[in-house]
Amino acid sequence: MRETLGDSTIAATHVVTGAGYVVTAAGHAVTGAGHVVTAAGYFRSYSAVGLLAVVGVLFVAVAFGAGRLLRPVVPTPEKLLTYECGVDPVGEGWAHTQVRYYVYAFLYVIFAVDSVFLFPWATVFAAPGFGATTLVEMFVFLGFLAVGLLYAYKKGVLAWT
């Protein structure tokens, strides 16, 4: 199959469906506009995501820091009491409540997200030129999921009771 992209004609081995790339015999992915997609350009596109994450973390840090610096610090015994709707406090101010459903929701999210991301990954992994890159990305992703699963295991959620 021959595709005309831009000024040149490229002999393509196959078209990656859904992604809009023509993969050449040399293993280069070429967009419909004739731009060659390389792994370096692919990782460079993550710089916007990284910049957004850094700006978000800095925004939260500045907001918390400004709150700490600007708030009045005048502790009094009345401010340290537990407030119970205008009634004098009875008992201790700290009550331990067992909430265990969050761990089940956490496990569901781990496995649901895992299965949702494995299907598109498998289609991209089959494309020439992106196999090693997507393999590394998937191992990083599975590593994060393994950390979540290890957390659930350490909490004892996976033990049958």
Image (tube, rainbow, N blue to C red):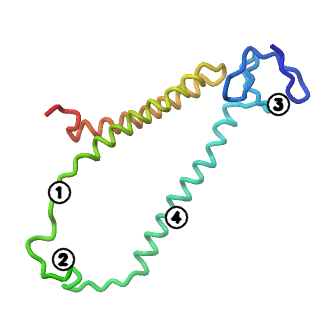
Q: Report, in whole angstroms, how far the alpha carbon at label 3 lies from the one at label 1.
A: 60 Å
Please, is residue 57 above or below residue 40 in the view?
below
Label drawn at residue 97: 1
Residue ID for mark 3: 34
Crowding near the residue tagged with mark 1, few <14, some 14–19, many ≥20 C-alpha atoms within 10 Å: few
Q: Which residue is mark 4?
A: 59
Q: CA distance from mark 2 to mark 1?
A: 17 Å
- Amino acid carrying label 3: it is Gly
Distance from Cα at disc 4 to Cα at disc 2 = 34 Å
Regarding mark 2 in the picture, which secondary structure is present there?
loop
Q: Secondary structure at mark 3?
A: loop
Left/right of residue 93 with respect to residue 13 in the rendered view: left
What separation in Å lies between label 4 and label 3 (alpha carbons)?
39 Å
State which tag comes first along the sequence, 2 or 3.
3
Task: Check whether the beta carbons of the residues at disc 4 and disc 2 lie within 8 A of each other.
Answer: no
Q: Residues within 10 Å of mark 2 (few under 14, many from 20)?
A: few
Amino acid type at mark 4? Phe
Q: Quadrant of the N terminus?
A: top right
Counting residues from the start of the chain, the first of labels 3 and 1 encountered is 3
Q: Residue furthest right?
A: 7
Where's residue 13, x and y in %?
74, 14
Q: Residue 28: percent from the left, percent from the top?
A: 73, 23
**Res 97 → quadrant:** bottom left
* Amino acid type of the residue that numbered disc 1 sits on in the rendered structure: Thr
Q: Do residues under tags 3 and 1 come within 8 Å of each other at their CB atoms?
A: no
- Per the rendering, the mark at residue 84 is 2
Q: Nearer the viewer, mark 3 or mark 1?
A: 1
Residue depth check, mark 4 versus mark 3: number of the one nearer the observer: 3
Q: Residue at x 71, y 31 (%)?
A: 38
Q: Residue at x 88, y 21 (%)?
A: 9
Q: Amino acid at mark 2?
A: Glu
